[in-house]
Image: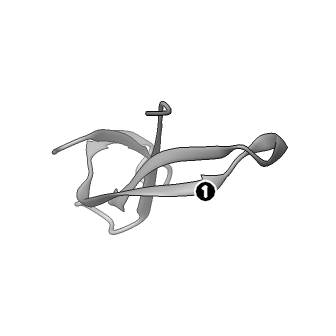
Amino acid sequence: MATEAYCVKCKAKRMMEGEKEVTFKGKGGAKRNALSGTCPKCGTKMFRITGNK
């Protein structure tokens, strides 16, 4: 899928590796959808919040 996300450690936008869809609890108990992956340069975990389906 190749999604761009912000890496906090590198302080730059990079393409995520090994991304997968995850769901977590948001504000007020609502469910939030996101993509989770790793930074190809430093290996830090990256998230990108997506809209509800």
Q: Residues within 10 Å of mark 1 (few under 14, many from 20)?
A: few
Label 1 residue SS: strand
Q: Residue furthest front?
A: 53
Vertical comparison of 36 with 49: above or below: below
Image quadrant holding the N terminus, namely top left
Q: Residue furthest right?
A: 28
Residue at figure coordinates x 83%, y 42% from the top left: 28
Vertical comparison of 48 with 51: above or below: below
State whether residue 5 appears in this view.
yes
Q: What kind of colouring is applied to the model shown?
A: one colour
Vertical comparison of 39 with 51: above or below: below
> At which x and y percent is residue 12?
38, 40
Report the number of numbered marks.
Answer: 1
Q: Amino acid at mark 1?
A: Phe
Q: Residue furthest bottom?
A: 43
25 to the left or right of 20: right
Residue at figure coordinates x 36%, y 41% from the top left: 5
Q: Quadrant of residue 6?
A: top left
Image quadrant holding the C terminus, namely top left
44 to the left or right of 39: right
Q: Residue furthest left?
A: 1
> At which x and y percent is residue 11?
45, 43
In-front residue for pair 20/15:
20
In-front residue for pair 41/38:
38
State whether residue 39 appears in this view.
no
> At which x and y percent is residue 34?
46, 47
The residue carrying mark 1 is 24
40 to the left or right of 50: left
